[in-house]
Image (cartoon, helix red, strand yellow):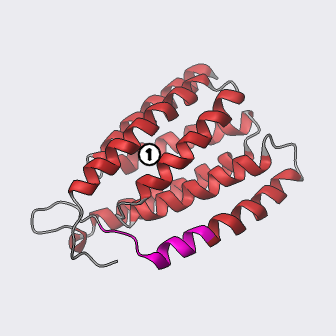
Amino acid sequence: MSSLELIASLLGALAVWLVVKRNILNFPIGIVMVSLYAWIFWEAKLYSDMLLQGVFAIMQLQGWYLWSRKNARSEEQELTVRSMQARHWVWTGAIQLVGTLGLGYLMSLTDASLPYLDAFAAVQSVLAQWWLNKRYLENWILWIAVDEVYLMIYSYKSLYFTTGLYALFLVMAVAGYLEWRKRLHPTAEA
């Protein structure tokens, strides 16, 4: 398992580095990474995370499509970065709460490890990926918060390569936020 976890971790680091750089190749690499992690999380009984990998595969395809659309590019051929409005935050919070309670309850009916914490992290990851696909700066704030939660989960589950990856993800999420903030387009649609 550790060699598979190492490969998935390396692919994950590359994918997030490419996201920070707003490079569309993050999506195909991400698809391979999430496929490997689905198996890893099944073995670790982190079922919410396992299901999350399937959702991520779909969202990776969605992001790949959205980022490759001709009208998604500015005149400088760079992806436009936008900022979330209050209504985005309200929906994000409501989905986070309902999703965590619902998925956590379902996972508590199985032999899942850490059902509610895993559910919280899975739901927040979906929300962060959604806002990333839509090119909202604040996706990085959600990633920063969830990466901290994942550091606790994965170290507790002795997934040490993945814990290291998420420590790197945390650093890259901060870098992503700072990089994207410089690219924030003040007139971009919300």
Residue occupying the far top of the picture = 3
Check the image and report above or below for 150 versus 81.
above
Residue occupying the far front of the picture = 86
Q: Quadrant of residue 83?
A: bottom left
Q: Relative to 166, is 24 on the left or the right? A: left
**Residue 165 percent location from the top left of the image:** 49, 31
Q: Quadrant of residue 103?
A: bottom right
Q: Residues within 10 Å of mark 1 (few under 14, many from 20)?
A: many
Q: What residue does disc 1 label?
A: 30
The structure residue drawn at horizontal position 55% and vertical position 54%, both measured from the top left corner, is 125
Question: SS of the residue at dot 1?
Answer: helix
Q: Relative to 180, is 141 on the left or the right? A: right
Q: Which residues are magenta?
A: 82-93
The structure residue drawn at horizontal position 33% and vertical position 40%, both measured from the top left corner, is 17
The structure residue drawn at horizontal position 56% and vertical position 30%, both measured from the top left corner, is 162
Where, quadrant-wise, is the C terminus in this rendering? bottom left
User: Residue flagged by tag 1: what amino acid is it?
Assistant: Gly
Residue 47 in magenta stretch: no
Q: Which one is nearer the viewer's eye here, 165 or 5?
A: 165
**Residue 138 percent location from the top left of the image:** 40, 60
Q: Which one is nearer the viewer's eye here, 12 or 123?
A: 123
Check the image and report above or below for 60 versus 117.
below
The structure residue drawn at horizontal position 47% and vertical position 47%, both measured from the top left corner, is 31
**Circle count:** 1
Q: Quadrant of residue 84?
A: bottom left
Q: Is residue 19 visible?
A: no
Q: Relative to 89, is 63 on the left or the right? A: left
**Residue 21 percent location from the top left of the image:** 26, 46
Residue occupying the far left of the picture = 76
